[in-house]
Amino acid sequence: MNPRRLIVIPCVLAILVAGCTNADPDAPETSGLTSLAPVTTTTTSPPDTQPTVPPTLPVGAPAGICRSYEDPIVRGVVAIEEVTEASGIAVSRTHPDVVWMHNDSGGGPFVYATTLSGEPMGAFELDSATFDWEDMALGPGPDPGTDYLYIGDIGDNFHIRPDILIHRIAEPVPDPAGGFVADVDEITLVYPEPGHDAESLFVDPVTGDLFVVTKPEAGGVAIIYSTAGSSLTDGAEIALTEVGRFQLDPGLYVSAAAIDASGMLIAFRGYNEVWVWQRSDLSFVATFAAEPCNTPSTAEVQGEAISFAAEGYSYFTMSEGSLPDINYVFSIFD
């Protein structure tokens, strides 16, 4: 394992949002925060220095996206005996027909690749320890043009952890022979108030910012925390910042999260529910102040994993258990 260096880096929001509106999630995007003026250079800049261009929101999802989903179907069955507590999945955007997954606590530092029909495509061991791996996200990282897997060691059933840990690796090349991943970034995250349990993680493809969603007691308030992508360096210790809250109905939990490749749809899931927001601002403050819509979910034994397809708005879900189904929910806009 790479030695952990304690480097305190302040966390800031990517942008301050002037207000929040509870917009209809099916309404067309009308926010005035869809673009930012580019940063201009001065005559003192070296001639070969490129200006830093702030990120801007891409075109929003189509109106009616929340009503566009068909009933779930079984796309495949995971034919890997070691995968018995699938807790995080991420559909590859680089390698067609590949999905990554990992087990819950006790499963060892392994990520597994399968085809979307469930055929094994390799087990990869990370040079890392595990405490309670709970979710996985795909997103940008230090090397532009490379997709990274972010594994969230964020579970805390007994509310005893002073901090949580993110393991980040460049997405491996799937190979049925598997392999060993020695180059693992380890990033420590610290809540404003310690002791949160969490099972949900996503990384914004637009800004690179990372988000963690807490898992309160059933029917409680899930808190959404974030840190800037620029702070996510190996060995860093980073203070998280709250960007939103989600009031759950009685008896419900948040067990996973995902964002689509465009960065415009965000999904949370419960054991048998899926909630979707259409993004309206860069920082997500206004987005999560709005009400989500409910979209279809398979009645899984204990659903703890969700990922959008490599392109478009369709999504996949998985449950814990041996030989789990890979369930697929298709959007007619894809």
Image (cartoon, rainbow, N blue to C red):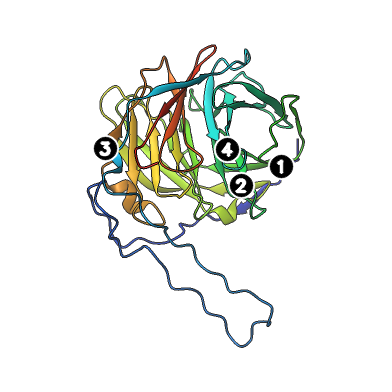
Label 4 with label 3: CB-CB less than 8 Å = no
253 versus 62 height, above or below: above
How far apart in space, not on screen, are marks 1 and 4 (Cα)? Answer: 28 Å
What residue would you read off at disc 1?
Answer: 4
Place of residue 217 in the rendered image (x, y in percent of width and height, measured from the top left): 36, 25
Quarter of the figure that contains the C terminus: top left
Return the disc, 1 or 4, that comes first in the chain's sequence: 1
**Residue found 49% across the figure and 41% down from its top:** 202
Apparent side of residue 118 relative to residue 264 in the rendered image (left or right): right
The answer to which quarter of the image holds residue 32 is bottom left
Front-most of residues 334 and 228: 334
Label 3 with label 2: CB-CB less than 8 Å = no
Return the disc, 2 or 1, that comes first in the chain's sequence: 1
What residue would you read off at disc 4?
Answer: 92
| Residue 67: mark in rendering | 3
Three-letter residue code for mark 1: Arg
How far apart in space, not on screen, are marks 4 and 3 (Cα)? Answer: 26 Å
Return the disc, 3 or 1, that comes first in the chain's sequence: 1
Q: Residues within 10 Å of mark 1 (few under 14, many from 20)?
A: some
Three-letter residue code for mark 4: Ser
Q: Residues within 10 Å of mark 2 (few under 14, many from 20)?
A: many
How far apart in space, not on screen, are marks 4 and 2 (Cα)? Answer: 28 Å
Return the disc, 4 or 3, that comes first in the chain's sequence: 3
Which of pointers 3 and 1 indicates the residue nearer the eye? 3
What residue would you read off at disc 2?
Answer: 237
Label 1 with label 4: CB-CB less than 8 Å = no
Q: Residues within 10 Å of mark 3 (few under 14, many from 20)?
A: some
Front-most of residues 298 and 199: 298
Which of pointers 3 and 2 indicates the residue nearer the eye? 3
Quarter of the figure that contains the N terminus: top right
**Residue found 51% across the figure and 40% down from its top:** 310
